[in-house]
Image (spheres, rainbow, N blue to C red):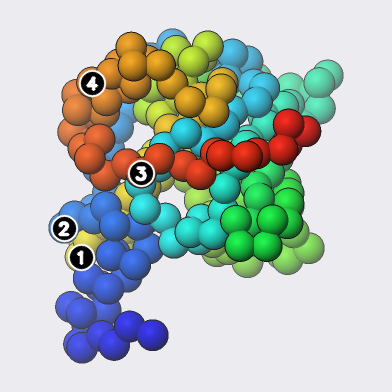
Amino acid sequence: MMKLIGFGGFVCGFLLVTVGGYGFGRCPKYPSMPKFNLTRILGDWYEVERSFYLPEIASGCTKLAFQPENENAVKLNNIFRLEVAIKTINRLTGSPSINIGYATPESSRSSIMDFKFNTRFPDVISRLLPGSGKYQVLFSDYDNFAILWSCASLGPIGYADQIWIFGRDRDFNVTIRSKIYDSLKRLGLEPDRLVISKNKNCPITL
């Protein structure tokens, strides 16, 4: 267990242990991806790279599947609520797991989504569960990759952010990876923070 000294130590410890990407002040503000097409983000995505994230330390073969909650239902002002199935393999035990959540975009053209897991807890509690919160697709070409970003703020004191790189396959070629890294740099995010996700010996059915 980490020993923290004083409130400043608590803040630094929280930021380091939670994600490893941190800064002072509030979370940066990124605009929604221009001309974001929600329907083109649907389907299967595989985690290829990510920044350090403690809850995923024992996870591998991570796959996200996005689909409309109801194929025939469109929410107010054309906002779909997406069902998100998160499938992983525990690298220590080899056991598969699946978690279901729901992502609600701010609008039909917004790449900023509010995500929460499907639980029996009241809404006010489910929003506080690890993994719940706002996520943003910073950039995607829809066919090859998507850059997903999230940020947690401790008011004006500091923030911790997280980056996930998802692909339609479990790896990228050099050209696509270079495009992703260039996109991150233009956004002021360092590709050096990323680690390769564990995607060896993944079940074909996952």
Whether residues under marks 1 and 2 lie with C-beta atoms below 8 angstroms apart, the answer is yes
Pointer 1 residue: 157
Q: Is residue 135 above or below residue 181?
A: below
Q: Residue flagged by tag 2: what amino acid is it?
A: Phe
Marks 3 and 2, the one that precedes in the sequence: 2
In which quadrant is the N terminus drawn?
bottom left
Pointer 4 residue: 182
SS of the residue under disc 2: strand
Residue 31's tag is: none
Question: Residue shown at 23%/21% (left/top)?
Answer: 182
Residue 195's tag is: 3
Pointer 2 residue: 24
Marks 1 and 4, the one that precedes in the sequence: 1
Marks 4 and 2, the one that precedes in the sequence: 2
Which of label 4 and label 2 is nearer to you?
4
Seen from the viewer's position, the closer of residues 8 and 64 is 64
Judge whether residue 50 can be spotted in this image. yes
Q: Residue flagged by tag 1: what amino acid is it?
A: Ile
